[in-house]
Image (cartoon, rainbow, N blue to C red):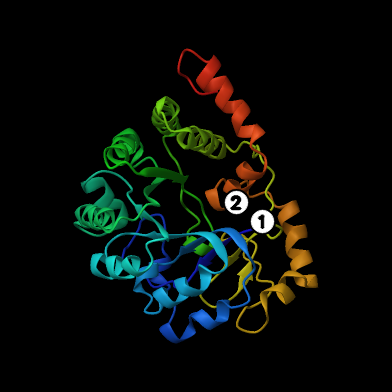
Amino acid sequence: MDGIIAVTYRCNAKCSMCHTWKHPTGRDQEIRPEHLATLPGMVRLNITGGEPFIKEDLSEILDVVKTKAKRVVVSSNGLLTRQILEVMGRHRDVGIRLSFDGMGETHDRIRGVAGIHAKALETLNGLKELGIKDLGIAVTISDGNAKDLVPLFRLADRHHIELATAILHNAYYFHKSDNKITDRCLVEQEVNGLVREYLSSPRPKNWFRAYFTMGIIGHMYGKERTMKCTMATDSFFIDPHGDVRPCNVMDFPFGNIKEKAFQEIWRSPEASEARRRVNDCRENCWMIGSVGHLMRRHPLTPLAWIARNKLLNKDGVAR
């Protein structure tokens, strides 16, 4: 099982594609470490927000969740350098992904904070000095940063770290319904360029990233997912209030971990209803939180694609 926990909706960035920062949680409303005691065993757990490092008891939360998940990764905008290095210095076995939504001014504009690109680079260098092994950067692809995708890959490559990808989505979680790719031809062209970089990499993990990133183009054109969503069956989302949902797109809480143990929630009639809704869902999302565990479970699907494109396809165009 995998999981995603948003520990706070407080945020110090003002991203154009996510308005969570306009709807912060109160500190006294948010889940605390003791609320996570009944979480199940997991393969991977993502800690997100808001900005997780704003949360004053994040280190104590990590103490708990590290006993539950084989791999824990925190998503951050990288602004709070001192706090990030302090917490990660105590949790060097935890992974972290810093948001880089473009190079220089592009990143600053999308994130709504002057100088955030330079600050995130400062944080990245500090994390490298700490010796954090599970380290990477992440980009949410849009028209506004598509031309920076290959430069971002090369930035990651220079630092010997990973580049993860996502694309604009609309959801209650983002408080957005108007995120839209306008210039699809541009985005497709630039994503294909990034995919070629992934496939040319000597690192097999990047080949699998190529497969996931090609799915982004399918999502952009409204194509049906190549892997059926199984959220609420083998993965879940918990918000800062403790509400358990199938994911961060479907707004259907089916229990609260402040009130009941996780297993009681997971086996409830409400959870069964959540699974029925996921089975009938037509949102057609393509996010690593709802795809990554499926790629691990059904590796032949991405492997077949990799074989076609890396070993057989000589013209370098992803198919």
The image quadrant that residue 153 belongs to is top left
Q: Quadrant of the N terminus?
A: bottom right
Q: 218 left or right of 162?
A: right
Q: 229 left or right of 151?
A: right
Res. 315 in view: yes
Q: Which element type, helix, strand or loop, lies under badge 1?
A: loop
**The label number, if any, that marks residue 113 in the structure image:** none
Q: Which element type, helix, strand or loop, lies under badge 2?
A: helix
Q: Name the residue that disc number 1 marks.
A: 231
Q: Disc 1, disc 2: CB below 8 Å?
A: yes
Q: 249 left or right of 46?
A: right
On the image, the x and y values in percent for residue 123 come to: 25, 58
Residue at 33%, 33% (x, y): give it: 150
Q: Name the residue that disc number 2 marks.
A: 290
Q: Residue furthest bottom?
A: 28
Res. 24 in view: no
Q: 307 left or right of 163?
A: right
On the image, the x and y values in percent for residue 85 come to: 28, 65
Residue at 24%, 60% (x, y): give it: 113
Work out whether residue 98 or residue 69 is closer to the camera in this orientation and state it.
69
On the image, the x and y values in percent for residue 236 come to: 62, 62
Residue at 66%, 56% (x, y): give it: 231
**The disc labelled 2 sits on which kind of residue?**
Ser
Q: Residue furthest top?
A: 314
